[in-house]
Image (tube, rainbow, N blue to C red):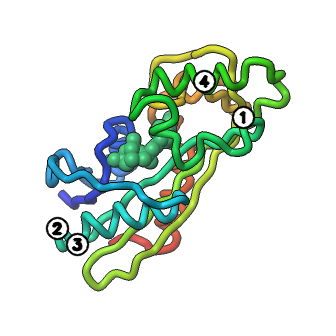
Amino acid sequence: MKKVVIATKNRGKVKDFETIFGPMGYEVVTMFDVAPDMEIEETGTTFEENAIIKAETLAKALNLLVIADDSGLMIDALNGEPGVYSARYAGDHDDEANIVKVLKNLENIPPEERTARFCCCLAITGPDFPTTTVFGTCEGLILEEKRGENGFGYDPIFYVPSQEKTMAELTPAQKGAISHRGNALKLLQEKIGER
Ligand SMILES: O=c1nc[nH]c2c1ncn2[C@H]1C[C@H](O)[C@@H](COP(=O)(O)OP(=O)(O)OP(=O)(O)O)O1
Ligand SMILES: [Mg+2]
C-alpha cells in the first residue's frame, strides 16, 4: 500500500487524514509510528511558519517526503484569537479547557457577531522536493454550548451554516468534504498531483 507520512501527534487530525487518504489507497503513517519521542517546538507566529517547521524537521530526520498540518480557530470578535495558539489557549492541548475559555470570552457577544473560521496550512517537503504550502479555511459560527460527539478540538462549538450542523455532528466523511483540512488537501492535490 502507498504510504503518506504526516508530521503530527494529534489523533483527531490523524483520523481526519485517514478519512480522506484511505479511500485514495494511502496508508497514513504518523509520528506515533515513526518518531513517537520527537517533540517539535512550534516557534512560528503563523500557521505557515509552524507547518513548515514541522514538515522540515520530520522530513530531515526520516529522509522522506512528509506533510505537516498547522491549524486553528480564528474568531472575529476576539480579533482572530486563539489563532496560531489554538492548541495552547487555556491548557496545553486541553480541548475542554480551550472550549470553556472561548465560551467565556464570547459570553456577551450576540449570535450574529460570533463569526469564525477554521484555518489549516499544509506544508509538504522532502528530499529533492521543494517545500510547498497550501491554505484551507472553513467558515462558521461559535455556538453558546457544545453539540455533537464526533471530531476533536473545537468541533463541538463550531457551527457550519451550510450543513446546519456543528463540525462534531458531521460524520468524518462529511467533515472532510467541507473542512479547512479537506479544502487544503484539495488544493495540495491540485498543486502537486499524486506522488
Ligand atoms: O478540525 C479541527 N477541529 C477542531 N479543532 C481543530 C481542528 N483543526 C485544528 N483544531 C484546533 C485543535 C488544536 O487546538 C489546534 C491545532 O493545533 P496544532 O498545533 O496545529 O496541532 P496539534 O498541536 O494538536 O498537533 P500537531 O502539531 O502534532 O499536528 O487547532
Ligand atoms: Mg501542535
The N terminus - image quarter:
bottom left
Camera-side residue: 92 or 68? 92
Element assignment for label 4: helix
Camera-side residue: 186 or 124? 124
> What's the distance in space between the residues labelled 4 and 1, CA to CA?
15 Å
Q: Indicate yes or no: mark 2 CB to ligand 1 under 8 Å.
A: no
> Residue placed farthest to the bottom in the image?
128
According to the picture, the residue beneath numbered tag 4 turns out to be 157
Can residue 17 be seen in the rendering of this structure? no
Instruction: Give the residue type at disc 1.
Output: Ser
Element assignment for label 1: loop
Instruction: Give the residue type at disc 2.
Output: Leu
Image marks 4 and 1: residues in contact by CB distance under 8 Å: no
Q: Residue at x 29, y 55 (%)?
A: 40
Pick whichever of labels 4 and 1 is earlier in the sequence. 4
Element assignment for label 3: helix
Left/right placement of residue 21 relative to residue 152 reads left
Image marks 3 and 2: residues in contact by CB distance under 8 Å: yes
Q: Nearer the viewer, mark 1 or mark 3?
A: 3
